[in-house]
Amino acid sequence: MFPDLRSLNPPQREAVQHLHGPMLVLAGAGTGKTRVITIRMAQLIASGVAPDRILSVTFTNKAAKEMGERTRQILGGGKLKARPWISTFHALCVQILRSDIERLGYPRKFTILDRGDQESIARGTLRDIRVTEKSLKPGDMLSIISGWKSAGLPPGEAAAAAADDKQYLAAMAYRKYQQKLKATGSVDFDDLLLLTAELFEEHPDILDKHQQRFSHVQIDEYQDTNGIQFRLIEALVAKHKNLCVVGDDDQSIYGWRGADVAHILNFGRYFPGAKIVRLEDNYRCTDHILECANRLVRHNRGRHGKVLRASKKSAHEVRFVKYDDENLEAEKTVFEIRFYIQKKGIPARDFAILFRTNEQPRIFESELRRQGIPYTLIGSQSFFDRKEIKDLMCYLKAIDRPTDEASLLRIINVPPRGIGDSTSSKILEKATRDGRDFWVVARETAAQGEVSKKAAAALDEFHRLLQTYTRRFEENARQMDVIVRELIEAIHYDREIEKQYPDPQAQLMRQGFVDEFVDAVAGYLEKSSDPTLTDFLDGCALNGRDDEPDKEKQAAEDAVKLMTLHSAKGLEFPRVYMVGMEENILPHKRSVDADTAQAIEEERRLCYVGITRAQEFLTMSRAESRIKWGSRRPTVPSRFLREMRSDEALEAEEAEEAGENE
Ligand code: ATP
Ligand code: MG
């Protein structure tokens, strides 16, 4: 029953067999850190630890799924009665809050806000305190507050931490914003962590319960934990200190989100007596790729120097390519990929195109479509940003939680059912003013003849429809996909699509999104042992940040992957294309403008993460000109290109350029 440890090298084996007390595995990319904690989970179970007392925290939903998959393989399918908890920080917190958030004065059925909801609340908050958009944009307000929340700073302490005018205004807005969230029973993404920490700190009995529940805790990508996540973990393991963390300081790429590399570098100080393991053999990349990565990251100062040896030799050098413009870059890159797929029989899933910013994938997507290559865009929020998906999600939210007025308002007249804007805002205004239920006020307003007869009838009918579905989902959650399909028909959503998109082709595509949504519900049902609508909506709120709902299915599909460097963390692909290797893209314009060593070093680490995703082939490309703000401009090659090349390569290139100039 013990997992086979022969596939591990000696230090990996040592880490897997060290089962109790604190341990840090600090090692470079591709050295098997994730593999170590996956196998260690099996080892813990084999040594008698109950599976459901093990908690493994990963950074993305995708990583959690992969680790679950790998553990199942090692442990042999469905033989176990219980499963280990493998989840992201956020998913763990949702689960803890769903059972105990009432102790903090929030309703058990709290809503998790998406970015759009958050912005509209931020806008309202700024309006309330009479701060104009010129002084502080809602988006900026949210990122400043998010920074404070990640550092664990409550509204009362924010003003003292404010460093400039904008931050000062944000500090004023923070308290109000927080009050608004609480009043509507909603939480934002950062609150999930913050409220869990608060719950643990103010209610020792709840903390005790969770301390008992998990006897062993593991964390992957530990370099990216922020202050509040650290507090949570510290609290969870305070009694037994059975904590194993793995990470690489060279891959810390979330400093802008409050992550603090100090947590990994000072691990021994926080947990005295911790065992420290170093892994030095990289099993992922060829020697050429790894040399390139090593040469680059050496330019960073604030790092823990470490050895990283390649165990794979290869004849293929890393390729550096330049194109005249961004269109050619996309066209030729996709052409090359198509050649390998169609002429050499290489599966599409072997290829990944990695980029820095969210504007970059668009031309690659249209090129892939034009050349007929299957692809998946990962890490964008596009799925949940689509109007159809937003509408349907709001229906489900309004059905699941009748007090969710923000969702209700979005769909109350979508498709049009004769409830005009003026009617709904009149009711909402009254309801908010008196702190009463929307529907109660609606009925009164109708009875008093303040809305037209037609609107009153429509309101009544719509309310009944929602109530019917609330009941149906509660009674028959197993049939959720069927019920969703019926709901879509009952509200005649096809009419909304016809109204928005006169073009039949566009209608078909939009209808496709609706079908995809129903598939996502069906996919959820397949995976869940105890499905509920609330749980499905939670999953969507969490996944929306870095995944599409059916990403698991898509990842297995044979398609070229397009993703940002951030979402590529932890993954590997045989053939990687890093595109747009230019100043102001990588390093990002924000960091170039900031011009601090800290900002540039984080971009360099991001580049390092990209390079070390490649197993066999790595191509880096740039365009010599690019359209920016409406006009074509020349670009400057990324400084990282120079830094990662060997001296010989640089000399050869200089000679070539001198030749060109003659
Ligand atoms: P990252 O820093 O990118 O997260 P990592 O340290 O987590 O990387 P893994 O993803 O666990 O590395 O492993 C990288 C690759 O090396 C995987 O394909 C893994 O299966 C393989 N690998 C790890 N250890 C060994 C080993 N001892 N022998 C052979 N292959 C190994
Ligand atoms: Mg890993």
Image (cartoon, grey):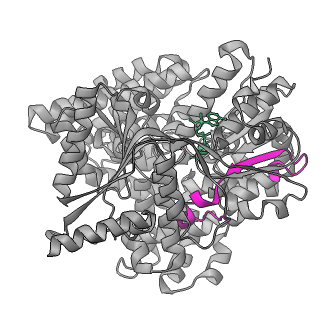
Determine whether, in the image, residue 632 is placed left or right of residue 610: left
The residue shown at (86%, 26%) is 47
Tell me the residue at 46%/52% (across/down): 611
Nearer to the camera, 428 or 56: 56
Query: 600 and 156: which one is in front?
Result: 600
Image quadrant of ligand 2 equals top right
x, y percentage for residue 640?
A: 42, 67
Does residue 236 show up magenta in the picture?
yes
Identified at 82% across, 36% down, the residue is 213
| Direction from residue 167 to residue 512 in the image, left or right | left
Magenta stretch contains residue 614:
no
The spot of residue 3 in percent (x, y) is 75, 23
Q: Nearer the viewer, residue 567 or 616?
A: 616
* Magenta segment boundaries in residue numbering: 235-261
From this view, report whether residue 412 is shown above or below residue 602.
above
Where's the C terminus, which quadrant? bottom left
